[in-house]
Image (spheres, rainbow, N blue to C red):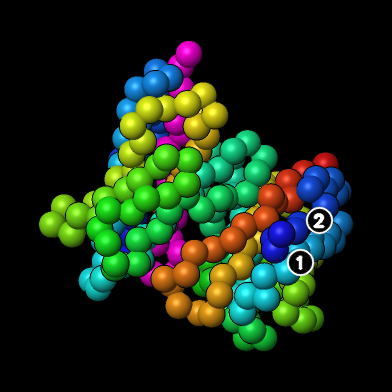
Amino acid sequence: AQSVTQLDSHVSVSEGTPVLLRCNYSSSYSPSLFWYVQHPNKGLQLLLKYTSAATLVKGINGFEAEFKKSETSFHLTKPSAHMSDAAEYFCSGTYKYIFGTGTRLKVLA
Amino acid sequence: DAMVIQNPRYQVTQFGKPVTLSCSQTLNHNVMYWYQQKSSQAPKLLFHYYDKDFNNEADTPDNFQSRRPNTSFCFLDIRSPGLGDAAMYLCATSRVGSYNQPQHFGDGTRLSIL
């Protein structure tokens, strides 16, 4: 079965420090993978996507993600967190736009 | 800007009283989706339209129906809302039918049941 698993339900970082949000996938074929961000009472906004081109994908707002087939991972990173990054983040992909359970990012001043 | 628009943003209805949520898009995308999202949970796909073809998820209750009269509009009908149907309902679109295209989401309709 195709699936995505977000390994952390909550992540807290201090402003200006790096962000790492983890996502593993399960797929029997080359997956398409996405990261979305959701601010309170808003829809999901696409941050970046992987569709079997470059393994390091750059997205909006300074986020990037690296596709690692050997580790079946697609972790989201940002070098320096900003207060405005506080939100819920969803990994999605493979078959039928399956979503992970989400990671709530908290940024401490 | 091309976008996905959901109306209303907030909807209150009574237990058992039918309610309709609407979604429109200016992206001219083939596929439109309806998701249910409960607090602190991932969006759950209810159904989607690929052009005029309706695709229901196996575990979507019969209480939920959808209509797509044309490319731009899609409606979610809840025939007899129960308290458990209180949630955020998200509409999304994507180009064509392959899963390597990202989805574009509206801002959702938050449904409350009295």
Q: Which image quarter: residue B3?
A: bottom right
Q: Nearer the viewer, residue A59 or B105?
A: A59
Magenta residues span A92-109
Q: Which image quarter: residue B94?
A: bottom right
Label located before the other in sequence (2 or 1)? 2
Tell whether position B23 is magenta.
Answer: no
The type of residue carrying mark 2 is: Asn
**Residue under circle 2?**
B7
Q: Position of residue A84 (x, y in %)?
A: 54, 29
**For the image shown, how many numbered marks are present on the structure?**
2
Side of B74 relative to A11 (left or right)? right
Q: Chain of mark 1?
A: B
The type of residue carrying mark 1 is: Ser
Q: Position of residue B1 (x, y in %)?
A: 71, 59
Q: For label 2, count other residues whose C-alpha is less than 10 Å away and answer few (under 14), some (14-19) or many (20+).
A: some
Q: Position of residue B55 (x, y in %)?
A: 58, 79
Above or below B67: residue B108:
above
Q: CA distance from mark 2 to mark 1?
A: 9 Å
Circle 2 — which element? strand
Residues at discs 2 and 1 in contact (Cβ within 8 Å)? yes
Q: Residue at x 40, y 42 (%)?
A: A63
Q: Which image quarter: residue A72?
A: bottom left
Q: Residue at x 83, y 52 (%)?
A: B8
**Residue under circle 1?**
B24
Q: Residue at x 47, y 46 (%)?
A: A60
Q: Residue at x 43, y 53 (%)?
A: A48
